[in-house]
Amino acid sequence: MSDRPNAPVSTPSSGNVFADLDIPEPEELDLKAELVYRISTIIAERELTQVQAAETLGISHPKVSALLRGRLDGFSVERLLRFLTALGCDVEIAVKPKAAARGRMKVA
């Protein structure tokens, strides 16, 4: 406890902000967020407009806008993986014994 009154309280992160906020299905949301980060990085590196990205991904311009704003509700992990392949990426899924007490998903 701090000697200062009204000192801010901090809690160490688990490494997954969604879990820290007690949001349902935090592992899936964390995975989706990482995939969207990769997608948005590729779009930015290629200097694609949202219209060009929409054509490449086979979705509407408003859906690209929602995706790049982090609105993940309408996007499954499978769909995000398809977007990465449409952008010319190879996607590999590795299944191996869990290293911790609970299995986890990650993008490498």
Image (spheres, helix red, strand yellow):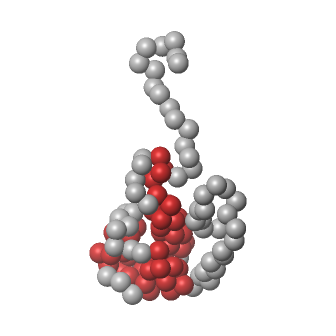
Q: Nearer the viewer, residue 105 or 101?
A: 101
Q: Nearer the viewer, residue 67 or 51?
A: 67
Q: Position of residue 48 (x, y in %)?
A: 45, 77
Instruction: Tell me if residue 102 can be seen.
Output: yes
Q: Position of residue 2 (x, y in %)?
A: 52, 17
* Relative to 22, 42 lies left or right: right
Residue visible at 39% across and 63% down? Answer: 70
Q: Position of residue 42 (x, y in %)?
A: 53, 73
Residue visible at 29% across and 75% down? Answer: 62
Residue visible at 59% across and 62% down? Answer: 104
Residue visible at 64% across and 55% down? Answer: 101
Does residue 22 sit above or below 26 in this rendering?
A: above
Residue that extends furthest to the left in the rendered view of this protein: 62
Residue that extends furthest to the front in the rendered view of this protein: 101
Q: Nearer the viewer, residue 44 or 89?
A: 89
Instruction: Tell me if residue 44 can be seen.
Output: no
